[in-house]
Every structure is written in C-alpha cells, then in structure tokens.
Image (cartoon, rainbow, N blue to C red):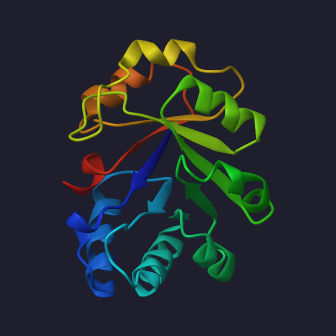
Amino acid sequence: MISYLITDPTFYGRKPWRVQVTFLRAFQKHPIDIVAFRNKTTPHIRSLALAMKRTCKAKGVKIYINQEIELFRRFRFDGIHLTSKQFDSIKKMRLLGNVVISTHTMQELHKARRLRAFAATYSPIFYTPNKGEPKGIYALRKIPKGMRIIALGGIVSKKEINRLKRYNLYGFASIRYFCT
C-alpha cells in the first residue's frame, strides 16, 4: 500500500527553504512514495512547488502537483492530482503523466474509472475537521474493482493505516499523519 503525502502550507510555511527543511524531516520519519504538492492559499506557489520538486527528486520520491494544470504542463511533475471539479481535464492530463482525481461519492469513483484516471482518492474515510460526515471504513467494501483507490481523510496514526490494510487499496493519503 503506497503512502501519499498531501502538503498543506499550515505545516510547511511559505518560503522555499522552509518547504525543503520540513519535508526532509518528514522523509526521515516516514516512508513516503508520492507527495502531492497542494497549496490553495499562497498566490505565487511556483517557487514553493519547484523547491518541493527538487526535494522529492533528491529523495527518489514521486511528486504530483495539485490542480495546477499549467505548472504540471510547464515543469513536468510526475503526475497531477485533480480536484473533483476537474473531471473534464483527466483525458488531456493523462497524456502528460499520472492523474489522480479526488472523489467523494461512488458515482465519482465510477466516473474516474470510466475516464481512466490512474488513481482516485476517496474521502473522508475517518473524521476530518470541516470535511463532512465520514464514509467509514466499511464504505471501502463497495469500491469498484480494478481501480487504484487511495483512502483519504482522518488518517493520523498507524491505527487508521492498520485498519485500511484489510481492504484492497492502492494506498492511503494524509496531511496530518506525515506533518505532525
């Protein structure tokens, strides 16, 4: 099961050197397969995204950019993590690299499979502040066969990860598990 770190500026700040230091520490504490660079609050994220890309490449970790299609095209990240409002971009983005799409319903999961996204996050599985009612662990029984699903939401310790291992998941994603 892959580990998928989703970044949040609350934990790493807004300066490129701080991004690198914070994530070098995270890489020492946890095995990380993919980092999804996500920053919805900083207006000029290019320098932060490129600092994160350099840090990941130095550690041999794949780096995806979240929702920023132009940065994905221009700087050749390993993949892109699209929001649930960007389903229409899956087909075009697949030509440039792996596409992960955020999903929150079974209908969205089926749509992601139909559009041949590389993988889909499905959330929230466990309680997460401000993310609505959690799906619960048993919702994972209903996921479409033959699809790479990354469980997301409320994964803050090994306890949740161990519970997820019972299901045929591609991986788990978290912000707080890796950065706190």
| Looking at the image, residue 180 lies above or below residue 69 | above
Labels in figure, total? 0
- Residue drawn at point x = 35 percent, y = 30 percent: 161
Looking at the image, residue 141 sits to the left or right of residue 111; the answer is: left
Rendering coords of residue 83 (x, y %): 52, 52
Looking at the image, residue 96 sits to the left or right of residue 158; the answer is: right
- Asked whether 22 or 73 is in front, the reply is 73
Rendering coords of residue 162 (x, y %): 35, 25
| Looking at the image, residue 17 lies above or below residue 68 | below
Rendering coords of residue 138 (x, y %): 42, 12
* Quadrant housing residue 45: bottom left
Looking at the image, residue 41 sits to the left or right of residue 144; the answer is: left
- Residue drawn at point x = 31 percent, y = 76 percent: 19
The answer to whether any part of residue 1 appears in the image is no
* Quadrant housing residue 76: bottom right
- Asked whether 2 or 150 is in front, the reply is 150
Rendering coords of residue 103 (x, y %): 52, 37
- Residue drawn at point x = 77 percent, y = 34 percent: 114
The answer to whether any part of residue 6 appears in the image is yes
| Looking at the image, residue 76 lies above or below residue 78 | below
- Asked whether 113 or 19 is in front, the reply is 113
Q: Quadrant where the C terminus lies?
A: bottom left
| Looking at the image, residue 132 lies above or below residue 36 | above
- Residue drawn at point x = 30 percent, y = 28 percent: 126
